[in-house]
Image (tube, rainbow, N blue to C red):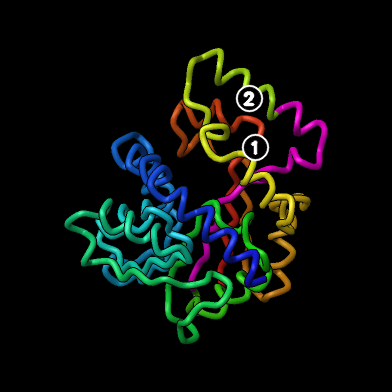
Amino acid sequence: MQGQLEELEKYWSNRAEGYSMVNQEELAGEQRKKWLTYLTDRFPDRAPEEISVLDVGTGPGFFAIILAEAGYQVTAVDYTADMLVQARQNAGELADSITWMTMDAQNLKFENEQFNVIVTRNLTWNLDEPARAYREWHRVLKSGGTLLNFDANWYAYLYDDEKRRLYEKDRANVAELNLEDQYTCTDIDTMEALARNMPLTRMERPAWDEKVLSDLGFTSIRLEEDMGDQVYSFMERINYAATPLFCVQAWK
């Protein structure tokens, strides 16, 4: 596990600045309002200042920033220190109102039942022990609290011919429309090599997530298997048409 974590940290450290630019585009675009509306419509019915939020795998800070701006008490963690540097810069004047911590999502350094809400995006697919991460998130969530995990079957095309065909169709559509390719603009060879070793790359999700969360004792689980249209920009919808974004919401 440690070796895999080190490889991932190196990759995401190298990606920090580029990924931060993606978050900056989101903060400046339509996604900022769309994501905030989607999230807060699913939060407990309480005033923002009464809700403590943990943003796991915050990356360059998108969720942490929009939620802190809305008045929530936000703690943001990431395993990659360079990501947190970018996140603080992106937060600007809000940076000091957010608690930033370097931490492994699979081994949280918090006491039990600390947070009303946990949010995470595009994280679980590249965890070495995703079930352990879910167990940790259940542990630090307060009774009556909720988890919102946004993810997709990223890189499933590595093991599925039909998904490969649809993935290539997305790449062709992106090129035809002269849009930025959100896959190939990264170090795609390195990411694919890492993804091949990730346990969730071969899993059919979110069915896998639902079972794990149920086994952990979450009282209610809600799946939304294709919700990208509610939060994505046009460019994102074209890039990820074959890889629908899903939301897993679970209550403790």
Residue at 28% of width from left, 66% of height from top? 98
Residue stretch rendered in magenta on the structure = 145-166
Question: Which mark is first along the chain, 2 or 1?
Answer: 2
Give the residue at x 78% y 50%.
202
Residue at image location 28% in from the left, 51% down from the top = 90
The CA distance from mark 1 to mark 2 is 9 Å
Expressed as whole percent of the image width and height from the top left, the position of residue 246 reads 60, 46
Quarter of the figure that contains the N terminus:
bottom right
Circle number at residue 243 = 1
Left or right of 40 on screen, residue 135: right
- Foreground mark, 1 or 2, reads 2
Q: Which mark is residue 170?
A: 2
Amino acid at circle 2: Asp
Where on the picture, by quarter, is residue 171?
Answer: top right
Near-viewer residue (28 or 44): 28
* Disc 1 packing (10 Å; few <14; some 14–19; many ≥20): many
Q: Please state which of residues 157 and 217 is positioned toward the viewer in this rendering.
A: 157
Amino acid type, mark 1:
Thr
